[in-house]
Image (cartoon, grey):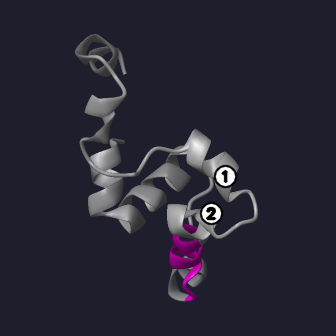
Amino acid sequence: MKYEEMKEEPCVQLKRLAEFLGCPFSEEEEESGGVDKILELCSLRSLSDVAINKILELCFRKGEVGDSKNHLTPKMEMRI
């Protein structure tokens, strides 16, 4: 799973992750919007609304595709 894939298709990637962890979403959970709710709760926008906004700013990058170039060397990127 790559960051770019999460940005392009977050629902698909979340379902893939759930299956990998051995707890796939049921049809009922998908139909009731469970996947969308998890994506909403885990979004940087949602997390930044929390009182610990300053801590999050220190821990999370901008959340933009390609921003890793500002933080990682090419060797570090290859290793990841």
Q: Give the labeled residue for mark 1.
A: 54
- Which region shows up in magenta? 32-40
Residue with the most extreme top position: 75
- Estimate how packed mark 2 is, as few (under 14), some (14 to 19) or many (20 or more) residues with alpha carbons within 10 Å: some
Relative to 61, say whether 25 is above or below: below
Q: Tally the marks.
A: 2
> Could you give the CA–CA distance between mark 2 and mark 1, rounded to whole angstroms?
11 Å
Q: Judge whether residue 36 is colored magenta.
A: yes
Amino acid, disc 2: Leu
- Quarter of the image with the N terminus is top left
Residue with the most extreme front position: 54
Amino acid, disc 1: Lys
Q: Judge whether residue 51 is colored magenta.
A: no
- Quarter of the image with the C terminus is top left
What residue is drawn where x is 56% and y is 60%? 24
Q: Is mark 1 on a helix, strand or loop?
A: helix
The quadrant in which residue 34 appears is bottom right
Q: Give the labeled residue for mark 2.
A: 47
What residue is drawn where x is 58% and y is 63%? 42
Marks 2,1: beta carbons within 8 A: no
**From the viewer's perspective, is 7 left or right of 49?**
left
Camera-side residue of 31 and 70: 70
Camera-side residue of 79 and 67: 67
Q: Position of residue 16 (x, y in %)?
A: 43, 54
Q: Position of residue 73 (x, y in %)?
A: 29, 17
> Which badge, 2 or 1, comes first in the chain's sequence?
2
**From the viewer's perspective, is 56 left or right of 4?**
right
